[in-house]
Image: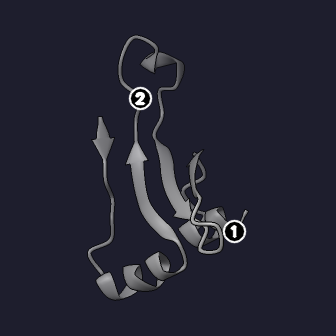
Amino acid sequence: MVEDLGSPDYSWYGPLTAQGLISGQTIRFTGMKALDCPFSLRRSVYRDPATQKCYGFLINPFKLSAKTIAAS
């Protein structure tokens, strides 16, 4: 199961994509091993503007902003 909680406020989303944020999703694992991780995770993908490399982050603190995660 994947649940995308993307913001419909595109005026807010625009500056984030300009800073390299490609996507932000709330995900949950499925399959035989899903019970090993029974909670939702936050998946953020960030593209470094200087190198064009993409980085993916899986975390569970939902109170952190996507910008904070990408800056870590």
Which disc is residue 29 wearing? 2
Q: Quadrant of the N terminus?
A: top left
Which percent across, then down, holds residue 60? 58, 46
Residue found farthest to the right: 72
Of the residues shown, which amino acid type is indicated by label 1?
Ala
What residue sits 31% from the left and 41% below the top?
2
Which disc is residue 71 wearing? 1
Residue 37 vs residue 13, the one in the foreground: 13
Residue 49 vs residue 10, the one in the foreground: 49
Determine whether the residue tagged by mark 1 lies in a helix, strand or loop: helix
Density class for disc 1 (Cα within 10 Å; few <14, some 14-19, many ≥20) is few
Looking at the image, residue 29 sits to the left or right of residue 42; the answer is left
Determine whether the residue tagged by mark 2 lies in a helix, strand or loop: loop
Of the residues shown, which amino acid type is indicated by label 2?
Phe
Residue 18 vs residue 38, the one in the foreground: 18
Q: For residue 32, which quarter of the picture?
A: top left
Q: For residue 10, which quarter of the picture?
A: bottom left
